Image: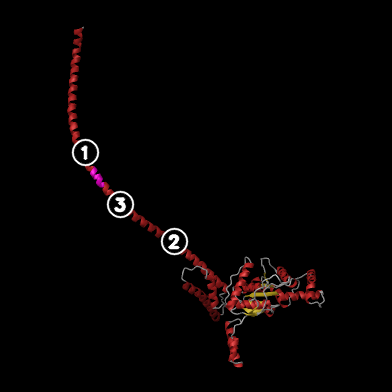
Amino acid sequence: FTELDDYRWFLKTLERVVDEELGSKYQSIIKRDDWFVDFLRDAPEPTGDEAEDADFDAPKIYEPIPSLDVLEDRLKMYLTQYNESIRGSGMDLVFFKDAMTHLVKISRIIRTPRGNALLVGVGGSGKQSLTKLASFIAGYKTFQLALTRAYNVNNLLDDLKTLYLIAGRDGKGIAFIFSDQDIKDESFLEYINNVLSSGVVPGMFARDEIDEICQELVPIMKKQYPRRPPTNENLFDYFLTRVRQNLHVALCFSPVGEKFRKRSLQFPGLVANCTIDWFLRWPRDALVAVADHFLASFNIACTDAIKKEVVQCMGSVHDGVAEYCLQYFQKYRRSTHVTPKSYLSFLNGYKEIYTQKLNDIESMAKRMNDGLTRLAEAEKAVILMKEELTIKEKELDVANQKADQVLQQVTIKKGAAEVVRQQVKKVKDTAQTLVDEINRDKMQANAELDKATPALIVCFS
């Protein structure tokens, strides 16, 4: 079913028919939600007493799951093993109910000989990731095209040849994931259609390559079919049979647009030879589970209750937009899609913007806190300076008092010194007067002596 309304209609009609034809006691049977898988058993541990050809792989027993919780734990274990074994391409999956049921379906398809899957869903639904995990659980290798700008039909044939050798010659299971992004040329689908329909791809193997393959398969076919003659025709048929049994093609297509409808009509083998698993829109509980998974370890500055409301809001917003897309199509007949990929981008965008804004706010808060810290330190310094100033003022008052006392003493001493100075000045002036008089008398005496000297000289001569 490609619509939820069709699915609900089928369940309702089934209940009504069972009630009318078989009775109400059988309704409980059809309401049971049983799922069967073949990967619940663990591999046996070696004891050392086993034969050399003992099989230590986990037994593939097809049995019902005890509960979805048990299945979820088992899938988480396989996912951990996958991420440990496949370096550089780890997956981060959320196992809500729809994801687990789709994985169970894909696992059942590729575990069936000649089982091929047509997985239809919008981008980001998990088609390729679930196929990789289901292939890992089944013990298969996974192969995808490595597209380049120059990739063409010859490169596709080379890749298909590699797949055929692994599946047909080596007899190993392998899952070939082919998405609509890998269709560089519509002619690619012609070869995929041949692989699914008959297994015969014209022109893929040269004659000498076919002979070499047939020679390698002679002992293998004799062991399995001892009565079948090992002719080249029988050997190549056996090779193609092994290819179709071991090569599991998983077509991952999107139903958006006209290409899917046209390709299905043009290449009917894509539909007729595949088991279709249609990925419906993620339900609201799945959206909430995904949001909770990606935001559980994300640091949000709020309480757990508010964080839970944020997670619920994420799922409600995306689910509401999806509902409006349906209403938009019914009203205007124009398709608009919100895919799981856009939902994951929405979550990543929220985390990036929240981190950016939180860093901005924390940076502003840090600057504000630094400013407040400096203001507090300045306030403490001012208080300390005020206390020191009070002490200094007291010391200054004491110093001023001492200075006044000293000044008073100096003033008193200065007055006494002035009196002494005046007295000394008077004595000095008196002495100076005496000196001046003596000098005058001396000068006068010298003058008179000078006058008398000639007469004295004459008297003695």
* Residue 179 at least partly seen: no
Res. 332 image quadrant: bottom right
**Cα distance, mark 3 to mark 2?**
37 Å
Residue to which mark 3 is pinned? 391
Residue 445 shown in magenta: no
Task: Indicate the secondary structure of the residue bearing disc 1.
Answer: helix
Q: Does the magenta stretch include residue 402?
A: yes
Label 1 crowding class (10 Å Cα cut-off): few <14, some 14-19, many 20+?
Answer: some
**How many other residues sit within 10 Å of disc 3, few (<14), some (14-19) or many (≥20)?**
few
Say which label, 3 or 2, has the lower sequence index: 2
Q: Nearer the viewer, residue 400 or 432?
A: 400
Type of amino acid under label 1: Lys
Q: How many marks?
A: 3
- The foreground one among 208 and 242 is 242
Query: In the image, is residue 412 above or below residue 162?
Result: above
Q: What element carries label 2?
A: helix
Coordinates of residue 85 in the picture (x, y in percent): 64, 67
Quarter the C terminus occupies = top left
**Can you identify the residue that label 1 sits on?**
414
